[in-house]
Amino acid sequence: MEHLKKTALFNVHQKYGGKIIDFAGWSMPVHYEGILQEHEAVRKTAGLFDVSHMGEIEVKGIQAEEFMQYLVTNDVSTIGNGQIIYALMCYPHGGVVDDVLIYKFSREYFYIVVNASNIEKDYVWITENAAGYHVQIINRSADISELALQGPKSEEILQKLTAQDLSQLKFFNFMDDVHINGVKCLVSRSGYTGEDGFEIYAENKYIEKVWEDLMEVGKVLGLVPAGLGCRDTLRFEACLPLYGNEISENITPLEAGLNIFVKLNKDKFIGKAALLKQKEEGLKRKLIGFEMLDRGIARHGYEVSVEGKNIGIVTTGYMAPSLKKNIGLALVDSNFSEIDTEINIVIRNKPVKARVINKKFIIKNYKK
């Protein structure tokens, strides 16, 4: 694994006993004590994740907002300074380049947070499509580290280290001058778990201090280090999409049920014509939730069938730790997307019974 990229917290992961794996070319901890224990901690107390492998790309200039409107599906003009919006960058055919978080500092300055596996691809895509706009594109990914403090005790833990009144920070809002025990950070109330929490950005050289300070003040409240394993089970229970699973170059936002983040009333954005056509003609595929009726755990890539006919594919499947049920998400023929429809998941060449259920597996506990 010597060839893999490392975050500034690699030594910390080893110190805390993290099991290191190759994730999108990075040496990252899949778990420390265990996926189930870490999952439960985030749901009940708090977990601290290193997500420094994520990318950060700045867009600056007098036409920054105009360019962002063209680049992504959502309407960035609807948010104010200090707010965040979730959006998708699409190809002209409607497939997804990446799903991103956009931090708006002003109409002339935006911060795009992109997925680790897509940093280089996204930077090239953004730069190429900026031609003709008066903007500057800067890839800050190598300079910035990011932590995710997630769970119901997150505010209480972080408040011990800063004079900022975190109770005033609303969901999908951020402050860019928060001092955490002396370290200047950008802090947003956001995350990828379905729980209240914060994402904390700082320069690489300071991130170890921020991690250790949080772990020190948080241990009495049940804070644990958390790996990428439970990050996936948590986001799955909250029905948050993962690039390469629920969305991809070959799966559009509309097929994934992300219509609310696609503003087809905007003047123009990349992929608009294809998505508008798809909506008008009706979706041939839809993302569904399902529950296993017979024994078996569905996994990403498993075939979905009805009466021996292939109708789709599992995008994510787990024994959901919070629900103690074998459930999953699948992209299927729209004719089989109604609630309570019986389907089969093909596990080791054998059809196993399942039924379509509401994708709202759990109630999200965001602080509004």
Image: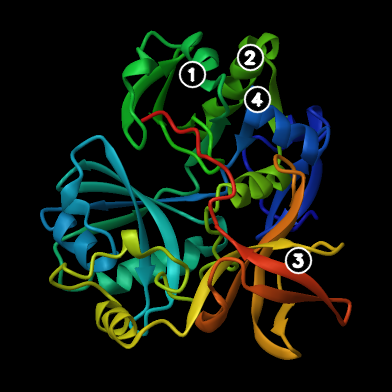
Task: Give the residue pinned by disc 1.
Answer: 155
Q: CA distance from mark 3 to mark 2?
A: 34 Å
Q: Are marks 3 and 1 in contact (CB under 8 Å)?
A: no
Q: CA distance from mark 4 to mark 2?
A: 13 Å
Picture disc at residue 299? 3
Task: Give the residue pinned by disc 2.
Answer: 218
Question: Mark 4 or mark 3: which comes first in sequence?
Answer: 4
Question: Mark 4 or mark 2: which comes first in sequence?
Answer: 4
Q: Nearer the viewer, mark 2 or mark 1?
A: 1
Task: Give the residue pinned by disc 4.
Answer: 44
Dot 3, how many residues are within 10 Å of its Cα: few (below 14), some (14-19), or many (20+)? many
Coordinates of residue 321 in the picture (x, y in percent): 74, 42
What amino acid is at disc 4?
A: Lys
Secondary structure of residue under mark 4 = helix
What amino acid is at disc 2?
A: Gly
Q: Residue at x 70, y 28 (%)?
A: 41
Q: State which quarter of the image contains the N terminus.
A: bottom right
Secondary structure of residue under mark 2 = helix
